[in-house]
């Protein structure tokens, strides 16, 4: 192994160690250039416009190398072909077709769905009632996708009996490193995806290009990404409205949970022409992007917000102002409540990474009193 690649692996190991303790997001660690692979000729690097947490290198004979920002690399070997001899042992081989996937990273399902590739997922880390993607629910109810245990408690026997050929995990797997190690010891490759760490919301969508490689649908992936990018590009000429948005929910213990200032929701609101009410709020206790506070603290910051958007991703949706007031009568004092500017997103929004452009447009329509019938995820609360 050359010194340059060894340095990369050492940095990556240190980065993952930091992530396991939940202090900071994983930092990008890249080789300076595409690796040399015996028997293959490097041809090009796939251009990426927003994503910063992976790279894709194209080699001769349709081989692809996925370089993930945690230092892991995967050689995608076309169906009917073999991995080159003398391949660096640190490069994981993914033999196409990859059509028996165990998926525990919930945000990825929508990308497979957008590519019409849900039939390539055989095992799920989420029960059918935990999905808000219709095709995923239907596939599980029909038995085409089986529940194989949560990410930290997989059914290893089922993974083996179903001939699982790839596990796709979120970074939560670093809280259960022995599980990841056990899956790999079974000979099943594990790919950890970092879309949630992308600084730009469209970076999350652009991960569809990586899954385009894994599903053999690269052209479709490019088209789906361009569709969402075009929606955002259309908003590029809109001036900032100067209006503020509070995005939150009330937990069962009465605390208000908001997103920190670096979260993708805050960036989406900004792109849509608004201003998230928290401009300098960071979760200093963990790498999570959510922050809990007392209702009084939220009251002091959000009472004059132009819009309230209730986050129904975890909590149940609110369908009326009375539902909101049932959580606390203090909400009656809020400017947005008095002026009738309260909204609620539906539960599909978080899982619909493939439609982040549509979600940004929803925020823009809210900020500009646009046509509610054109919205994808938002509902006005009266």
Image (tube, grey):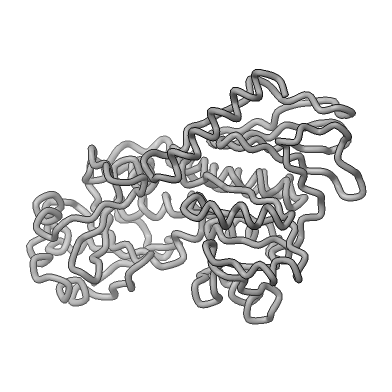
Identify the residue at horizontal 75%, vertical 58% (top origin): 165
Left or right: residue 308 versus residue 21 is left
Q: Which of the 4 quarters of the picture holds residue 374?
A: bottom left
Residue 54: x and y in percent read 60, 36
Toward the viewer: 121 or 343? 121
Identify the residue at horizontal 34%, vertical 48% (top origin): 289
Toward the viewer: 345 or 66? 66
Q: Which residue lies furthest to the right in this view?
A: 80
Identify the residue at horizontal 92%, vertical 49% (top origin): 80
- Which quarter shows the C terminus? bottom left
Q: Which of the 4 quarters of the picture holds residue 267?
A: top left
- Which quarter shows the N terminus? top right
Residue 287: x and y in percent read 36, 45
Left or right: residue 372 versus residue 209 is left
Picture mark count: 0
Toward the viewer: 256 or 48? 256
Identify the residue at horizontal 8%, vertical 66% (top origin): 330
Left or right: residue 185 versus residue 330 is right
Residue 294: x and y in percent read 14, 58
On screen, residue 328 above or below 39: below
Toward the viewer: 285 or 76? 285
Q: Which of the 4 quarters of the picture holds residue 108?
A: bottom right
Residue 299: x and y in percent read 11, 56
Left or right: residue 139 versus residue 152 is right
């Amino acid at each position: 192994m050359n010194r340059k690649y060894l340095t990369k692996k050492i940095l990556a190991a240190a980065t993952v160690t930091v992530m396991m303790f939940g202090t900071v997001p994983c930092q990008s660690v890249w080789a300076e250039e595409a690796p040399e692979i015996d028997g293959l000729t490097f041809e090009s690097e796939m251009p990426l416009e927003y994503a910063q947490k992976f790279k894709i290198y194209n080699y001769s004979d349709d081989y692809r190398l996925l370089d993930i920002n945690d230092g892991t690399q995967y050689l995608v070997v076309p169906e009917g072909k073999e991995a080159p001899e003398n391949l660096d042992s640190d490069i994981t081989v993914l033999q196409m077709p990859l059509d028996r996937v165990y998926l525990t990273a919930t945000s990825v399902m929508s990308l497979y769905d957008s590519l019409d590739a849900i039939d390539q997922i055989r095992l799920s880390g989420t029960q059918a009632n935990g999905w808000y993607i219709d095709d995923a629910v239907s596939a599980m109810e029909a038995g085409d996708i089986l529940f194989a245990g949560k990410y930290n408690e997989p059914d290893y026997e089922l993974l083996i009996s179903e001939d699982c050929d790839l596990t796709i995990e979120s970074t939560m797997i670093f809280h259960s490193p022995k599980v990841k190690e056990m899956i790999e010891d079974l000979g099943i490759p594990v790919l950890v995806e970092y879309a949630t760490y992308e600084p730009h919301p469209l970076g999350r969508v652009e991960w569809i290009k990586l899954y385009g490689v894994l599903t053999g649908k690269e052209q479709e992936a490019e088209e789906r990404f361009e569709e969402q990018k075009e929606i955002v590009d259309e908003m590029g000429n809109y001036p900032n409205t100067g209006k503020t948005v509070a995005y939150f929910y009330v937990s069962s213990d009465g605390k208000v949970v908001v997103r920190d200032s670096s979260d993708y929701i805050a960036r989406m609101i900004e792109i849509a022409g608004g201003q998230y009410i928290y401009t300098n709020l960071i979760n200093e206790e963990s790498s999570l992007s959510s922050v809990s506070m007392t209702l009084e603290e939220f009251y002091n910051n959000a009472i004059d917000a132009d819009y309230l958007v209730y986050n129904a991703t975890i909590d149940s949706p609110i369908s009326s102002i009375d539902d909101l007031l049932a959580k606390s009568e203090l909400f009656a004092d809020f400017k947005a409540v008095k002026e009738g500017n309260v909204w609620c997103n539906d539960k599909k929004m978080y899982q619909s990474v493939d439609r982040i452009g549509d979600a940004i447009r929803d925020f823009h329509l809210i900020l500009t009193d646009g046509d509610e019938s054109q919205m994808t995820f938002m509902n006005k609360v009266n």
